[in-house]
Amino acid sequence: MRKSKKSAASRFGGWLGRTYMKLTRWEARVAMTLQRIGIPRLAAKLVSLTGRFTLFASLLYIGFWIAVFTAIVLLAGLVLQSGVLASVEDPLKQSSYPKWQEGSDGFGLYQNGYRVD
């Protein structure tokens, strides 16, 4: 029988769950230690909530700067792409390329005023 291979999302979810449980156990140990040294339960809970808020705010801050950096890279790519496309299209607009037109020798393909077809 063949073992089914876990997907990357499944492995990441498992890692995230294990990490959350480790943090929760660590938080409970800190709260118990604070209560053992004589800090009231409410104050220990407040310290715990402050730690969670700090962690959450830090993750939001990091996520914000990642989003800003990504937006800057995307905008720079769009600006550079439009500049590259403009430089590629400019030679096509020059008169050195043959064009279909009505000229002195009749309708045909003209380049620099001379019929080339």
Image: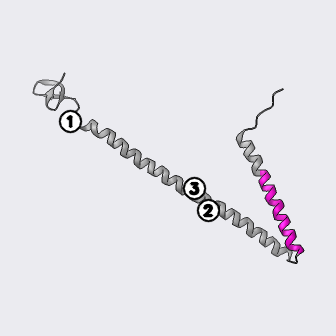
Point out residue 76 in the picture as x, y percentages from the top left corner: 44, 51
Q: Quote the CA–CA distance across marks 2 and 3.
A: 9 Å
- From this view, report whether residue 31 is shown above or below residue 63: below
- From this view, report whether residue 58 is shown above or below residue 41: above
Query: Magenta part of the protein: which range?
Result: 17-36
Q: Are marks 3 and 1 in contact (CB under 8 Å)?
A: no
Tell me the kind of residue under disc 1. Answer: Ser
Tell me the number on the disc at residue 66: 3
- Mark 3 residue element: helix
Tell me which residue sits at (33%, 39%) in the image: 88
Tell me which residue sits at (66%, 60%) in the image: 59
- Main SS, magenta residues: helix
Residue 110 horizontal side relative to residue 37, left or right: left
Dot 2 or dot 3, earlier in sequence? 2
Dot 1 or dot 2, earlier in sequence? 2
Query: How would you rate the neighbour count of disc 2 (Cα within 10 Å): few for under 14, some for 14-19, many for 20 or more?
Result: few
Tell me the number on the disc at residue 95: 1
